[in-house]
Amino acid sequence: MQDEPTPTELIKAVADFLRSEITPVIKGHNAFKLRVGINALDLVTRQLALADQGDAAEAARLKQLFEADGALLELNRTLSEKIASGEVDLKTPGLAEHLWQTTMDKLAVDQPNYASYKRELGTK
Amino acid sequence: MIETELGRCVATFHPGATGVTGAAKLSGGASQETWTFDIVHPDGPVGAILRRAPPGYGAAPGRAAGLDAEAVLMQLAHDAGLPSPKVMHVLRPEDGLGRGFIMARIEGETIARKILRDEEYAGARPILARQLGRVIAGIHGLPRAKLPQLRSMSATKEIDDLEREYRSFNWPRPVFELALRWLRDHDPGPSSEVTLVHGDFRHGNLIIGPDGVRAVLDWELAHFGDPMEDLGWICVNSWRFGEIDKPVGGFGTREDLFAGYAEAGRKADPDRVMFWEVMGTLRWGVMCCGMMQRFRSGPDHSMERAMIGRRSSETEIDLLRLLAPRGK
């Protein structure tokens, strides 16, 4: 068992330091790169908090859709092949809902400020 | 150091020029660079831009039109009265600067967030979509006989290219599969009219002033194809920068874009434009994945590239909004 602090706490502490102490003293192109770096740390924090639950729910939906078992990557390969071949499409019960939920869960980690995502959160 | 070669070069085409100052690299990967500089002249400085592949780099890769073709296209657009910088000089081997060309520098803004939010552009925003409709119609109408050799594209070929690239990543994306399938099922077939297509007509490649559009840049992806491709590409949500209810670049409506297009004597086909908007959304998503691949395989191992890989999910939600809208 690894000791505390948790990865999330460590990454948050670094990101907060960069945001509040370093950002004000960096100029030019490096200021842009610093912002990208802080965004990356924030993304990792969100992934650590959200991904396990999202992945488990995604896998459960896929298993129900196909009555199949397997790792999430393999289940997604199967779904991709079935969509490509036309075996399943938007008329297939549950498919649209599954794609929407999976995509919303990805955006919650990747880009929660993306305007399309915020709009869809509100209109759900 | 580049100022020495540039100074020698400008003296050969700009009479009275005594050198250059302020040379600074604006952007560039390994094979293509853009530099800004001022030509020193007794009548006052002249702003100029160098676009080049440095010495030692050969022909442009893959889809690129090539710098020689870009120079011809920009000059043709300029001669046709379209907002395009004057090409001042095409580089020769004896210039020692590589391949490329020097053009007049046009002042203005290319950064979307400033164009969409700053007070300075408040007067430009409502007129831009119509203006750009006229401009892209002018580009589509450039005389075929004078155009350089360019690749020919069709919707079917573009779907094939996107699918091949997506499959090469070997990472399943059910939403991309859905989009590929939709594109195949809705492929409108060959365009009745094949014209010059700019290929990257969007924010970042448009110089905007308070008065509206001042220049169209970056003809790297120019080709022959369905003119509706350009109209669809500028409507892709990724170029709206948060202003998602204004489909044209976050500043205008499709109706205004099409009206401008019609004012210049051409007719937009809204269904084909929508098809190309879906294609463009997928294309940007695949490009984001490609950035991630290049981050992994180097040589550009930058966190910016890595993070762009995580933007492909933005195109997935936009594809779902287009193909499987909720609440219907």
Image (spheres, rainbow, N blue to C red):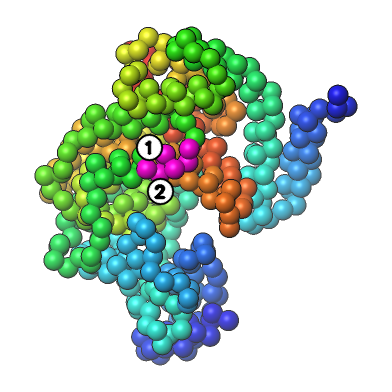
The amino acid sitting under disc 1 is Thr
Q: Position of B238 compared to B73: left or right?
A: right
Q: Nearer the viewer, mark 1 or mark 2?
A: 1
Which residue lies at the image location 48% right of the left edge and 66% below the top edge? B31
Q: Which residues are magenta?
A: B164-170
Which residue lies at the image location 36% right of the left edge and 24% below the top edge? A83
- Residue B224: % across, % down: 22, 55
The amino acid sitting under disc 2 is His
Labels 1 and 2 share a subunit:
yes
- The quarter of the picture where residue B138 lies is bottom left
B167 within the magenta span: yes
Which residue lies at the image location 42% right of the left edge and 39% below the top edge? B167
Residue designated by label 2: B203
Which secondary structure is most common in the magenta stretch?
A: helix
Q: Determine the chain carrying the residue at label 2.
A: B
* Residue at the outermost front position: A69
Q: Determine the chain carrying the residue at label 1.
A: B
- Answer above or below: position of A28 versus A84: below
- The quarter of the picture where residue A55 lies is top right
- Residue A52: % across, % down: 65, 20
**Label 2: how many Cα within 10 Å (few below 14, some 14–19, many 20+):** many
**Label 1: how many Cα within 10 Å (few below 14, some 14–19, many 20+):** many
- The quarter of the picture where residue B180 lies is top left
Of the image marks 1 and 2, the number of the one nearer the N terminus: 2
- Residue B197: % across, % down: 25, 53
**SS class of the residue under badge 1?**
helix
Residue designated by label 1: B281
